[in-house]
Amino acid sequence: MPGLTDESVRAILQLRAYKPPKTSYDSMPLSRRAAVLVLLFPDIHGRLRVVLTLRSELLKSFAGQVALPGGKADTLTEKPENTARREAYEEIGLPLPNHNFVLSVPTLQSSSNQQSLGAEKQQIRFSITHLTELPCHLSQNNLSVRPVVAVLLPAPAQKDAPISPGDINLDNMNKLDIPIDLESLLIPRLDPKEVSVVFSTPLEAFLAKTYAREYTHPPTPTPEKWYKGKLAKWYGRDLYMHEFMAPVWAHKAVTVGRGAARVGYNDKLITLEEAVLLAGGSEKNEKKDEDVLMHYRVWGMTARILVEAARIAYEKEPEFECLEEKGDEDIIAVLWDYGMLREERKHGEEFVVNEMFEKGNL
């Protein structure tokens, strides 16, 4: 298997080196604090993908929408990184900070041009490394949302401790092989009350107007209709509203079924062992015409965060128009100064605040 591409290595290093501007997050009351996790991992070709979720239809807010794992802070002393990781643990079962985790997968054996599962299993350790935080965004319900960026990588065989940011450099990351198709085999444990689907999309795609066929494995039949955007007014300023339609093969999306998470393949539930065969290029995986290509709408604050993360990582501007400034720290600061982000939230306050901005009263 190939290791990380040079471009992916540089992207990780750029994110690690990024220093966000001063934030008002620590001044916010507890009821206004939230964090989301931008979790990156390498695909089978060494390109970086980002984990996304489809929120449960049972939720009271933003039901059925694509989102990054995350949620509100529990205490005033909880850092954004801990909030994002705790919420990711609750929503999709991602291990908590300072813990490596081990994936035990059957080995693939080849004979007569066919692959089968061996009796032995290989133990592969992974570690999740914090890279940086991005400027806060103001959600539609007036929360100050701090994006936290982290990367999931195979842990070096000689290390027992989790990978730290200091371990990340060009030399040792180029030596990290991608031992398996992580997109297919890292099967989350979903909380059906909060999340109905987990899938991933290439981070770099959020800089492009079109979605390249090779972004998916196997490639999509044709280039996908990917991006559309429009200029809108939001909190008294121009804002480009980005919308992406993410194509995801059904067998690469994780869904909720029988009380646990399974990989969805042709709208059926399959086991981990079957997923191993799919990832290894079994006969079942060769029947591409029988697979189902799903599409998930990524828009709003989630889309803006992903565009900003990609701009930092790949050191280039998107092919479409976007604001030069990242995040909403300026708007949050104004609202805070005018006493509009108090501990107690009022029903419909977001509409009142937006109207005041539009009329020039803030």
Image (spheres, helix red, strand yellow):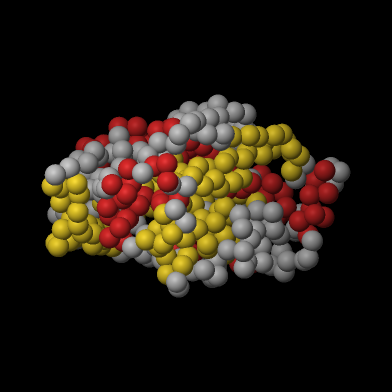
Marks counted in the figure total 0
Viewed as shown, does residue 330 lie left or right of 184?
right
Q: What x and y, as percent, mark residue 22?
A: 55, 47
Position of residue 41 relative to residue 317, above or below, is below
Position of residue 54 relative to residue 21, above or below, is below
- Asked whether 155 or 339 is in front, the reply is 155
Q: What x and y, as percent, mark residue 267?
A: 47, 56
- Work out whether residue 247 can be spotted: yes
Q: Give the residue drawn at x 62%, y 68%.
A: 58
Residue lying at the far bottom of the rendered structure: 259
- Asked whether 131 or 243 is in front, the reply is 243
Q: Give the residue drawn at x 71%, y 34%.
A: 231
Viewed as shown, does residue 142 lie left or right of 171?
right
Q: Give the residue drawn at x 32%, y 55%.
A: 275
- Work out whether residue 83 can be spotted: no
Q: What x and y, as percent, mark residue 223?
A: 49, 30
Q: What x and y, as percent, mark residue 120?
A: 14, 61
Q: Give the residue drawn at x 22%, y 41%.
A: 1
- Asked whether 225 or 316 is in front, the reply is 225
In which quarter of the view is residue 203 placed? top left
- Asked whether 331 or 160 is in front, the reply is 160
Viewed as shown, does residue 219 lie left or right of 325?
left
